[in-house]
Image (cartoon, grey):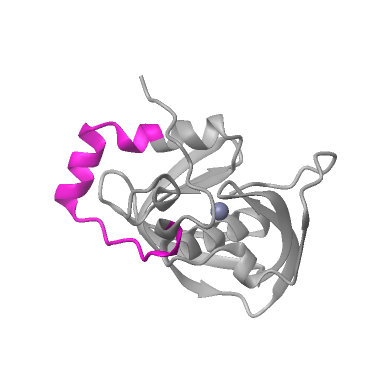
Amino acid sequence: MPKSLPVLVNPHPLLRQRAQEVTSETLAQLRREGFIDDLVKTMQVEDGVGIAAIQVGYLHRIIVVQEGMRVRVYINPTISSRSLRRESDVEGCLSVPGVVGTVRRARSCTLKALDVDGKLVVRKARGLVARIYQHEVDHLDGVLFIDRAERVVAYDPQKETPKV
Ligand SMILES: [Zn+2]
């Protein structure tokens, strides 16, 4: 059974590290150990719509993204293109509890990654999913949304701010 892992909270130093590229051997091992399933479970238990492996202290370039009803796992993801058009929206982070911030990001972007079987996937998204891609890839480079936010305010439980 997948288990939920403890999420690291800012200012934990690991959150500022750069995660490492995942080799096929590492991917096979992480799958065998159930880590990928545990990471998905953690996102769900924490009520997030995205999570990066670094948030549970694994310095591997792996992210999980809730895309509508589907949960997708991306290995070694990169943002291969971003729209010139940007938009500001409010986002929160499982690793920065208690606050949310307005962050200006590309409105749409293309994500290049491997899936859990090691096959190349190219995904174009806009709006929330594009925002999650950019937030999670930032995590892999040790960047938190509070570094980019125009305005950081207390989390308001009345508002449904996505946590990623
Ligand atoms: Zn986050």
Look at the image and say whether residue 17 sits in the magenta stretch.
yes
Horizontal arrangement in the rendering, residue 84 relative to residue 123 (left or right): right
Horizontal arrangement in the rendering, residue 101 relative to residue 115 (left or right): right
Prevailing secondary structure class for the magenta stretch in the rendered image: helix
Measuring from the top left, give residue 49's x and y in whole percent.
59, 43
- Count numbered badges in the picture: 0
Measuring from the top left, give residue 80's x and y in whole percent.
44, 72
| Quadrant occupied by the N terminus | top left
Residue at the extreme bottom of the image, as rendered = 84
**Above or below — where is 28 with respect to 119?**
above
Residue at the extreme left of the image, as rendered = 25
**Above or below — where is 138 with respect to 7?**
below
Residue nearest the viewer, comparing 145 with 79: 145
Report the residue at 23% width, 32% height from top: 33
Report the residue at 26% width, 44% height from top: 117
The span shown in magenta is 15-38
Report the residue at 48% width, 42% height from top: 7
Residue at the extreme top of the image, as rendered = 1
Look at the image and say whether residue 1 sits in the magenta stretch.
no
Residue nearest the viewer, comparing 126 with 47: 47
Measuring from the top left, give residue 147's x and y in whole percent.
60, 70
Report the residue at 37% width, 48% height from top: 57
Measuring from the top left, give residue 129's x and y in whole percent.
60, 54
Horizontal arrangement in the rendering, residue 125 relative to residue 71 (left or right): right
Quadrant of the image occupied by residue 35: top left
